[in-house]
Structures are given as structure tokens and as C-alpha cells.
Amino acid sequence: MTSADRRILLVHAHPDDESLNNGVTMARYVNEGVHVTLVTCTLGEMGEVLVPELAHIAADRDDTLGQHREGELKEAMAELGVTDHRFLGGAGRFRDSGMKWDENGHATAADEIHDNAFWHADLTEAASLLVEIIREVRPQVLVTYDEFGNYGHPDHIQAHRVAHYATDLAAARSFRPDLGQAWDVAKVYWVAMSASRFRDGLRAIRESGDTTTFEGMDPDNLPPFAIEDDLLDAMIVAPDFVPAKLAAMKAHKTQITEDGAFFAGGMDMAAVVWGTEFYRLIKGTRGPVGDSGLEEDLFAGL
């Protein structure tokens, strides 16, 4: 299969999720001539505004953050070279559900949720919108979150459910033929983080005397998105595309501060922290692995 024949579809909940989780993966595949499609399920209307002069656009004031984040996402995609980006059902079809932190430190549904929140979306309706995209794009690879949404956010969990249900329905010849010819996605991956790398990184940060970066995270009690290495299946190593990833992250100005934890340590540290992205293979056959013992191409074996 040539690069021009390869197609990958990523399903994310909000603008900025794609750059944080898959920035170097997307930039690498675009550079190789792979067709990269991003589907974002909401505009991220309920996000926190970290730019003081833009505080008025927050949901509890002017409620225009979603439109602003749509522009941020467009800028981020330009940094990564991605030209095929869609909002599920169109921009604003589903609203960011918001979240709160529970007693275990996990994200969970907020006490009050908008009627049009993605968390309340009818699963078949939302999945059918994605089925149409899958049948149009015909990706061999689909990337989304795990069943916990990686850290519990209701929109991440819903994106996981929609992505998996749509993958099944898209392959069913008798389901909604009006949405296009059936297509079976060969490989489905969940985004992940290497527990060993995260653990080692946290310890190095603490040993340097830094007690504020990733404050509250304990190397011996990692959050659920940190996956032990024996459960990982693939890694994309692409340090050359770290500058593009960082630029895409910086494009999401309302959500990510340039003096925050994501940019601690300078470019040398960034190449180590952000230059490799990990995945768990959930559907499909594992392809050839590299010296790492993991697939080093999400299209391996196809």
C-alpha cells in the first residue's frame, strides 16, 4: 500500500485534544502523503479560558468560546498540515458537556448539562453522522479514546462510544445504505501514554526541585491514561515533528498556556516528552514490530 492509498481518521471530543494526543502522528502522516481526517465532536464551549483578556467569551458570560476555539483549531490544523477536518454533524451540532472533578480526581459529568450536550446525544444519531464520514473517507485506521475517555470526561467517553458504534455500523451492508457503501475499518487504536515514561518523567521533575509542574500527580499512583507498557501496542516516534505539535498546541491559546507544564524544559525536553505517541490496538491484527517491541506504524501489516 502506497502512502497515497493510506487513510487515517481521528475522532476527538474538543479542539486541542487532537494536538495534545496525536500532534506528531498527524504531522508525520501528512508529511508522508497519507490522507488524515480529523472529526471533532464539539466546539469546546465549556472549556476554561486561560487568557485574561478573553475571559468575557466564557460560557458563563458571552458564551462565544466555541466560535473562538473553532478558529484556534483551524490554526492548529494549519500547523500540522491537516486539510480535512470536520465537526460531527457540522459546527455546533453537539455542545461541549462540561465536567467537574470527582473525589478520586477523575473528570465526571457536571451537575448541570446543556440540553444539546454531546453527553446527551442519541448514540445512533451521532454514530450515523460518523458512519457517513467513515464511508466517504474509507480509512484503514481509526484513532479515538479508551472506554474511560482516558481521564473520565463525559465527552471523551461519548466520543469513544460513537466511534466504536459507528465503526461497527459502517461495516454493515444493510445499515443505512443511503449513507454510502459499507466500509470495514481494519484497525482501531486508543490513544495512550506510557506509564514508565510518565513515571520516570515525574520523578525527574520532582528530583530537580520542581514541585509545581504536574502538581498533585504521584509517580506511584498515576492517572488512568498512563498505561503500563506491556499493554501498549504501537508507538509513533517522530521528534522532527515536535515543533509542529508545539505550534499546534500553542494555537489553542485559550486552553494551553505557553508558560505552563506542557512546555516545561525547553525543546530538548519537548522532543523526549512529545516526540513519541503511544497507542493500544483494539481492533485488527497487530503488524510487524520494531526494536521497541511495538508497532512503529499504525498501518503496520496492512
Image: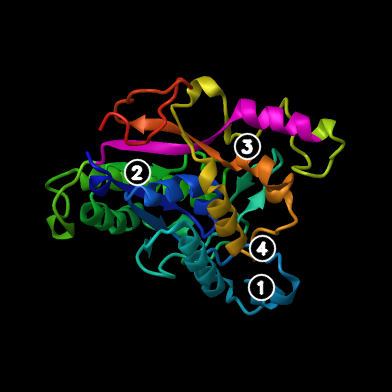
Q: Which residue is mark 2?
A: 142
Lower position in the chain sequence, tag 4 or tag 1: 4
Measured along the vertical axis of the image, is residue 54 above or below residue 243? Answer: below
Residue drawn at the location 27% of the way across and 57% of the way down: 133
> Which quadrant holds residue 221?
top right
Residue drawn at the location 40% of the way across and 37% of the way down: 189
What whole-number distance in Å separates the C-alpha atoms at marks 4 and 1?
A: 10 Å
| Residue 154 seen anywhere in this rendered image of the structure | yes
Q: Which mark is residue 272?
A: 3
Q: How is the image coloured?
A: rainbow
Residue drawn at the location 52% of the way across and 60% of the way down: 15
Mark 1 residue type: Asp
Disc 4 packing (10 Å; few <14; some 14–19; many ≥20): some
Q: Which residue is mark 4?
A: 48
Q: Which residues are magenta?
A: 185-205
Mark 4 residue type: Glu
Task: Give the number of the mark in front: 1 or 2.
Answer: 2
